[in-house]
Image (tube, rainbow, N blue to C red):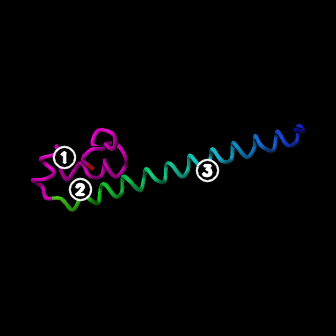
Amino acid sequence: MTTASMLNSLYHCGFCAQVSAFVDAWKERMRNRDGARQLEAMSDHALKDIGLTRGDIPAVRRGELTHHYRGHV
């Protein structure tokens, strides 16, 4: 393998890593958005049952509560 081809493959690996990170972040935002929509459709009583209020939904959308409430959202 020549030095040029090694450098070329390293560049592509870095580019692929950046694209992959972007796609992963986008998927996480979509999961948060979808989870927030599901929460918005729930009644206040159902939200209370899982320990949330309507005021918590924006934090879910921003991704601040995703890991703690992942099983419920």
Residue 7's disc number: none
Q: Earlier in the sequence, mark 1 or mark 3?
A: 3
Secondary structure beneath dot 1 equals loop
Q: Earlier in the sequence, mark 2 or mark 3?
A: 3
Q: Residue at x 75, y 43 (%)?
A: 11
Residue 48, given in percent of the width and then of the height, sits at 12, 48
Identified by mark 2, the residue type is Leu
Q: CA distance from mark 2 to mark 1?
A: 9 Å
Q: Residues within 10 Å of mark 3 (few under 14, many from 20)?
A: few
Q: Residues within 10 Å of mark 2 (few under 14, many from 20)?
A: many
Secondary structure beneath dot 2 equals helix
Q: Nearer the viewer, mark 1 or mark 3?
A: 3
Q: Residue at x 17, y 49 (%)?
A: 53
Q: CA distance from mark 2 to mark 3?
A: 30 Å
Q: Residue at x 51, y 48 (%)?
A: 24
Q: CA distance from mark 1 to mark 3?
A: 34 Å
Q: Earlier in the sequence, mark 2 or mark 1?
A: 2
Identified by mark 3, the residue type is Val
Quickly name the residue at label 2.
39
Disc 2 and disc 3 in contact, CB within 8 angstroms: no
Q: Residue furthest left?
A: 45
Disc 2 and disc 1 in contact, CB within 8 angstroms: yes
Residue 33, given in percent of the width and then of the height, sits at 36, 57
Quickly name the residue at label 1.
52
Tally the numbered discs. 3
Is 71 magenta? The answer is: yes
Write down the region rendered in magenta. Answer: 43-72
